Image: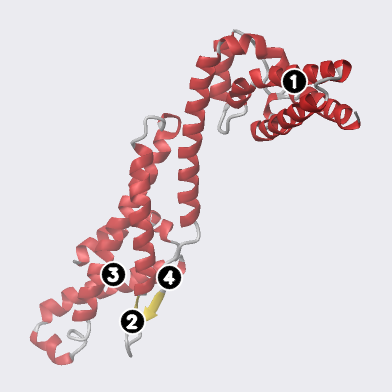
Amino acid sequence: YLEMWHAVNRFMTEKKKWMTCALPALDFGEISTLLSENRRVALRLSKRFEKKPVPRLIVQDLKAEIESLMADMALIECISADGLQKRHWDEIRTLLGLNIDETKVSIDRISEVANRKLEGLQAISERAMKEYSLENILNKMEAEWVNLEFTFTTWRESQISILHGSAIEDIQACLDEHTIKAQHVRGSPYIKPFERRAVDWEKKLFLIQEIIDVWVNVQSMYLYLEPIFNSDDIIKQMPQEAKEFKIVDDDWQRVMAMVKRDPLVLRLVDFPGLLESLTQAQ
């Protein structure tokens, strides 16, 4: 008997809490666990009190309360979905024809109307979750680039700073992965609420890729030509070419100094004329 009264009291207390709390506080997973546990308890008690009329009626009442909450679970799943934003709640208010404040109203206040509009609510909920998933992908990508930096090393015995190869490999791997992700996000039919952000991010990745491609190519040519035009004999023999290389050398030193001062990869797109300078150096 003690187990029966404990089960009834616990379930009714929990049910009242969930049915009367504000909608943002709903936890579909926790409520599902509550129902599963109490269905098992109710089944066990039903067998135990099968031949005892009064306890059997109490257990039947408990099972009815459990079924009552179960009837609202599809609605609770919709209303507690991750990603529901103001724009979605505006749609929900229009769909239900209710001027509700989602931060204050409880499920028991809207369940009758909302269950009649369940299909429409499910469509809004599903879209909200997919938008939320895409936004999280964007957030995660951007976060992974926040502290990503170029590193530098000195070329052989010279004092020439160059991009460190292993850092470029890591950055390129990140670019390859995130470019594919960015294209997937931008191509989704659920991207509309933050389409501009997704397009701008994809363009930024493309620009970083273009700058790095040109930069690595210029570095390769520079390291080949620098010792040649560091020779007085070559300068005398090829004065015009030496003059042109001096311009490239000055640009190279300027670019490297600028990036070493601010080595964050995302800052590349903010350096004025960087791509143009590297392109001309080719």
Q: Residue furthest left?
A: 237
Q: Earlier in the sequence, mark 2 or mark 1?
A: 1
Mark earlier in primary sequence (3, 4): 3
Q: Which mark is residue 160?
A: 2
Does residue 199 appear in this view?
Answer: no
Circle 2: residue type: Ile
Residue 165's place in the image compared with 62, above or below, is: below
| Disc on the earlier residue, 2 or 4 | 2
Q: Are marks 3 and 4 in contact (CB under 8 Å)?
A: no
Q: Residue at x 58, y 9 (%)?
A: 116
Which residue was labeled with disc 1? 63
> Where is residue 49 drawn, in percent x and y?
83, 24
Q: Quadrant of the N terminus?
A: top right
What's under tag 3, amino acid-wise? Asp
The mark that comes first in sequence, 2 or 3, is: 2
Q: What number is the disc on residue 221?
A: none
Residue 265 at x, y percent in the picture: 41, 60
